[in-house]
Image (tube, rainbow, N blue to C red):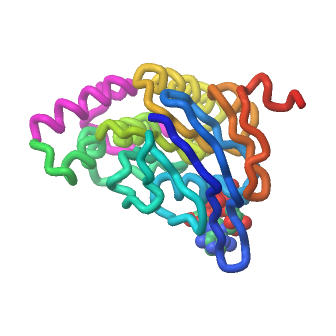
Amino acid sequence: MKIKIENLTKQFANHTAVCRFNAEIESGQLIALLGPSGCGKSTMLNMLSGILTPTEGSIFFADEDVTFTAPEKRGVGLVFQNYALYPHMSVLDNICFPLEIQKVPKAERTRRAIEMAKLVHVESMLERKPAQLSGGQQQRVAIARALVKKPRLLLLDEPLSNLDARLRIEMREEIRRIQQETKITTIFVTHDQEEAMSISDAILLMKDGVLQQMDQPQRLYDD
Ligand code: ADP
Ligand code: ADP
């Protein structure tokens, strides 16, 4: 799905976290939102998911204005830094959960959850609890749970930052593979330049709430 961000601004009491952000993202791309801590990445992500309402500006998904659409009606899948899995539920139940909320019949949600578990390579761990998984495996489950509703947009908030160096490299390649297999438009938040360069089709570079540059990774710092 194509995304258009127009003049997007978020003002907190006495601080402008995001200022007049403009960008167009082509359908099917993996975009890195890159910048140092405090530059406004989470605020941007929260406005895209609908958790935060902008002070000014608009967000379009395809050609639909979703600026004030409720989060659950946007068709967005979210993956958090700390995975946020339900500790008392099995892998299968974690992946099924968004469909249970939507009252999808049990056989159908199990079928779709297993399909997602296969996509992210956790199909041999369906009965385990999150605590019995490695960090990388937990992140795979979180991705499967985010994708099970077939969202139009996948948002990943620093998904690799709690992993050790080896798993970080493994999982960034996995995120790339999963994105290419599903072709879902994806925005990946990171403060790590190398990570952004290695994974994305294009980088949105932010500083102090402002979009500094948007370009392909190899062209980012050229001029
Ligand atoms: P990042 O994700 O890049 O670390 P954030 O979007 O979390 O940046 O924050 C951008 C700026 O806005 C920071 O200065 C932060 O302290 C401030 N900020 C974020 N959320 C709030 C809030 N709810 N109220 C006031 N200031 C906030
Ligand atoms: P991140 O690791 O994504 O940058 P933070 O730890 O900076 O997130 O912020 C965590 C939460 O606290 C976010 O929801 C953010 O909006 C909120 N927050 C950040 N800075 C402030 C602030 N100065 N005042 C109020 N809330 C804030």
**Vertical position of residue 30 compared to residue 106: above or below:** above
Quarter of the image for residue 162 reads top right
> Extreme front residue here?
63
- Place of residue 50 in the rendered image (x, y in percent of width and height, measured from the top left): 45, 58
- Place of residue 55 in the rendered image (x, y in percent of width and height, measured from the top left): 59, 69
Q: Which residues are magenta?
A: 106-135
- Place of residue 61 in the rendered image (x, y in percent of width and height, measured from the top left): 45, 44
Dividing the image into four equal quarters, which quarter contains ligand 2? Answer: bottom right
> Extreme right residue here?
223
Residue 166 shown in magenta = no
- Place of residue 182 in the rendered image (x, y in percent of width and height, measured from the top left): 40, 25
The C terminus: image quadrant = top right
Q: Horizontally, is 202 left or right of 213 in the view?
A: left
> Is residue 4 among the parts visible in the rendering?
yes
Q: Horizontally, is 221 left or right of 73 in the view?
A: right
> Extreme bottom residue here?
13
Name the residue nearer the viewer: 5 or 95. Answer: 5
The N terminus: image quadrant = top left
Magenta stretch: helix, strand or loop mostly: helix
Residue 121 shown in magenta = yes
- At x 42%, y 38%, the residue is 143
